[in-house]
Image: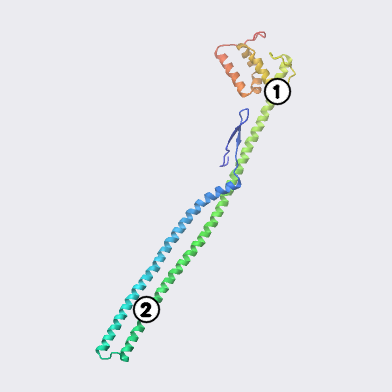
């Protein structure tokens, strides 16, 4: 039988087990498939998110490091040019040039060099940061693309799982129906056999072939035969019961309910264990 199995059994009045199967709906199967696919998706997504986050953290730290390095070098340069400006002023004063055009030109050249170097430093820093930022942008786009891929993978997986679940459900339905149909056919055949046994016993009654204690006439409905057999059997003594059972065992087995027939068998076995022998005198009960 398929992976999905019958949910239980029903007992009919003759004790025959009929399989029952509460087949899940397509909506229920879709929910099962989605739950299973979500587990794989969540595992893949968590791994992707963690890896992307770690890489982005490293890149972001590189940007912070570049900014920190820029600030340190900038401050160092500013101090160097500040010292150089002070040294030029002191030298000009010592030479009596004070605020001469020569001294001013030296200060102007020093300032120009400072601005040029600081500008170059800033450009280098911005280029390094832009390279890292572009890498971060590419990483984020890769994350989006991979997430889209995982979502499509999940939907494909849901459909595959759903297809398998539907096949299992439909196969189980088919197998349960086949089993129950076969059982019904067997029960119909048994019912026909039972009916024949009842009719045969009724004919024996009509011909006087079986001792009867009932006042019903021989033409009564065969539906009353089980009660007739039990009545005839119960009206006999132990030895008579053994003789009656020997002569009508097949009819009793095919006609009586399972519980009634089991009770008869218990009585017969008890009689035999107690040493009772069947009588063959037609007048003796």
The residue lying toward the viewer, choosing from 216 and 280, is 216
Query: Which secondary structure lies at badge 2?
Result: helix
Picture disc at residue 120? none
Q: CA distance from mark 2 to mark 1?
A: 116 Å
User: On the image, which quarter does residue 109 sit in?
Assistant: bottom left
Q: Which badge, 2 or 1, is on the more N-terminal residue?
A: 2
Q: Position of residue 12 (x, y in %)?
A: 62, 30
Residue identified by numbered label 2:
118
Q: Nearer the viewer, mark 2 or mark 1?
A: 2
Height in image: 29 above or below 19? below
The residue lying toward the viewer, choosing from 196 and 227, is 227
Query: Which secondary structure lies at badge 1?
Result: helix
Q: Position of residue 130 (x, y in %)?
A: 44, 71
Q: Position of residue 230 (x, y in %)?
A: 65, 18
User: On the image, which quarter does residue 53 sit in?
Assistant: bottom left
Instruction: Please name the residue shown 29% across and 82% down the image.
Output: 84
- Most distant residue in the left direction: 94
Residue 131 shown left or right of residue 238 in the figure: left
User: On the image, which quarter does residue 220 sit in?
Assistant: top right
Residue identified by numbered label 1:
223
Instruction: Please name the residue shown 34% across and 74% down the image.
Output: 73
Q: Badge 1: few (under 14), some or many (20 or more) residues near its Cα, within 10 Å?
A: few
Instruction: Please name the residue shown 61% across and 39% down the image.
Output: 175
Height in image: 197 above or below 212? below
């Amino acid at each position: 039988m398929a992976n999905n199995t019958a949910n239980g059994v029903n007992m009919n009045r003759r004790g025959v087990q009929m399989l029952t199967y509460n087949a899940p709906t397509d909506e229920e199967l879709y929910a099962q498939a989605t739950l299973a696919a979500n587990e794989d998706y969540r595992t893949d997504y968590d791994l992707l998110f963690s890896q992307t986050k770690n890489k982005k953290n490293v890149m972001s730290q590189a940007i912070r490091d570049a900014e920190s390095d820029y600030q340190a070098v900038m401050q160092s340069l500013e101090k160097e040019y500040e010292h150089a400006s002070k040294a030029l002023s002191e030298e000009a004063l010592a030479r009596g040039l004070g605020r001469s055009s020569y001294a001013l030109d030296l200060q102007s050249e020093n300032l120009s060099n400072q601005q040029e170097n600081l500008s170059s430093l800033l450009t280098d820093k911005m280029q390094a940061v832009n390279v890292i930022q572009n890498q971060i942008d590419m990483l984020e786009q890769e994350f989006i693309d991979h997430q889209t891929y995982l979502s499509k993978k999940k939907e494909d997986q849901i459909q595959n799982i759903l297809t398998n679940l539907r096949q299992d459900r439909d196969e189980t339905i088919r197998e349960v129906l086949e089993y129950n149909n076969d059982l019904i056919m067997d029960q119909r055949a048994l019912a026909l056999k039972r009916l024949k046994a009842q009719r045969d016993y009724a004919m024996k009654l009509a011909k006087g072939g079986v001792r009867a204690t009932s006042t019903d006439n021989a033409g009564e409905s065969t539906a009353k035969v089980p009660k007739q057999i039990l009545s005839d059997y119960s009206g006999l003594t132990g030895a008579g019961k053994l003789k009656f059972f020997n002569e009508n065992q097949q009819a009793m087995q095919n006609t009586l309910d399972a519980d009634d027939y089991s009770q008869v068998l218990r009585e017969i076995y008890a009689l035999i264990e107690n040493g009772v022998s069947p009588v063959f005198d037609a007048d003796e009960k």
